Image (spheres, rainbow, N blue to C red):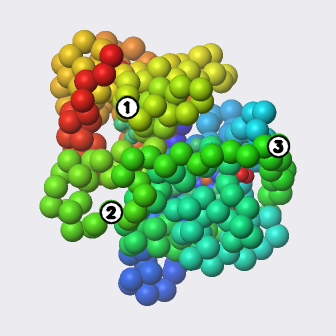
Amino acid sequence: MLGRQTVLAVAVLVAGTSGAATQGAVERGAYLVNTVMTCHNCHTPIGPNGPDLARAFSGGTPVFDTPAFRVRGSNITPDKQNGIGTWSEADIEKALRDGVRPNGVPLAPPMPTGFYGVLTSADGKAIAVYLKSLKASPNKVEAPVYNSHFERELFPGADKPADPAALQADKVKLGEYLVTIAHCMECHTPRIDGKLDFSAVGAGRQEFAGPWGTSIARNITSHPQKGLKAWTDDEIKRAITQGVSRDGSKLKPPMGYGFYARMTAGDLDAVVAYLRTLPPRE
Ligand code: HEC
Ligand code: HEC
């Protein structure tokens, strides 16, 4: 898991750009990428103690191996040969929002672009500016293999950029935005024949196998027994940021608790406010 010092180290890497506006965008981009959006989970090599931040965003692990494709988290540093150093800011934004590279080749679904179309234009740009400010890594990642067509799953409401004024005015809307870009519901929604069942958003049930054994995404709707209805706000926040369930038991990966731990208090409040509005599901 990501510790406090390591996040600060990442923040130091981005210092030194010129201009107050750019600096603001770099800071905002760093916040989104390193906390809420957990990009390290898939783009930073995994070491014995979790993501190895000395090699932040240089790719290679995890490997997603399915009959349709075999892909690895890409090197998303500005290296010209092995990273995305030749991409423009607009190219990066297009990849995030539409799931397509500058050369027209679609990104395989582990990259959760079906959730990122909702990014406000300022946030989309901030992420691109931040990625461009990273230290380039020459790490070469095995090329993706695509065996058959795959479909992109567009999360409801993520088809167009959110209105920043609406997010500022309404805590529940802000929470919905954050939960969408954090792709919480990609894990916490059941799949039928491999496809997310959007009629049961938040009901959980997907299984995740890894070195931790198997974990099953839980029901995070407002269901009185199976969901979070009876939990206090603090209990929900502790689960998200510390990986501790209501009964005190430790929660397993792959949820990125250590990244969410760095979310602002206001953003966490908004996430909880939104989760409470999710209709109860069995
Ligand atoms: C759940 C895993 C996952 C998360 C979270 C994730 N990515 Fe990815 N991403 C991938 C995978 C896997 C690929 C490679 C897909 C392929 O090769 O088809 C990828 C590809 C990319 C690419 C294209 C790189 C290239 O050379 O083609 C960019 C840019 C990117 N991700 C940026 C990000 C950013 C920024 C974030 C956080 C906002 C993020 N990703 C979050 C898994 C993820
Ligand atoms: C990569 C998949 C994944 C993502 C993304 C994810 N979760 Fe989870 N989450 C899980 C899994 C799996 C568990 C159960 C772990 C266990 O049982 O040990 C869990 C557990 C939880 C719990 C504890 C529930 C309980 O009954 O103890 C809460 C609350 C929660 N997640 C909320 C969220 C929120 C909010 C987000 C987004 C900010 C999120 N999760 C993102 C996979 C994920």
Would you say 227 lies left or right of 103 here?
A: left
Q: Residue drawn 47% across and 73% down?
A: 125
Residue 251 vertical position relative to residue 167 in the rendered view, above or below: above
Q: Residues within 10 Å of mark 2 (few under 14, many from 20)?
A: some
Amino acid tagged 3? Asn
- Taking the view exactly as shown, the residue that stands out farthest to the left is 169
Quick one: SS at disc 3?
Answer: loop
Q: Residue drawn 52% across and 78% down?
A: 16
* Residue position marked by numbered label 3 in the rendering: 147
Residue 241 vertical position relative to residue 93 in the rendered view, above or below: above
Q: Are marks 1 and 3 in contact (CB under 8 Å)?
A: no
- Give me the C-alpha separation between circle 1 and circle 3: 30 Å
- Quarter of the figure that contains the C terminus: top left
* Residue position marked by numbered label 2 in the rendering: 162
Q: Residues within 10 Å of mark 3 (few under 14, many from 20)?
A: few
Residue 27 in sight in this render: no
Quadrant in the picture for residue 159: bottom left
Amino acid tagged 2? Ala
Return the x and y of residue 220 as percentages of the image width and height: 33, 27
Residue 143 vertical position relative to residue 122 in the rendered view, above or below: above
- Give me the C-alpha separation between circle 1 and circle 2: 22 Å
Residue 236 vertical position relative to residue 175 in the rendered view, above or below: above
Quick one: SS at disc 1?
Answer: helix
Q: Quick one: label 3 or label 2, which is nearer the N terminus?
A: 3
Q: Residue drawn 73% across and 61% down?
A: 105
Check residue 199 in the rendering and tell me which mark sits there, or answer none: 1
Nearer to me, 244 or 95: 95
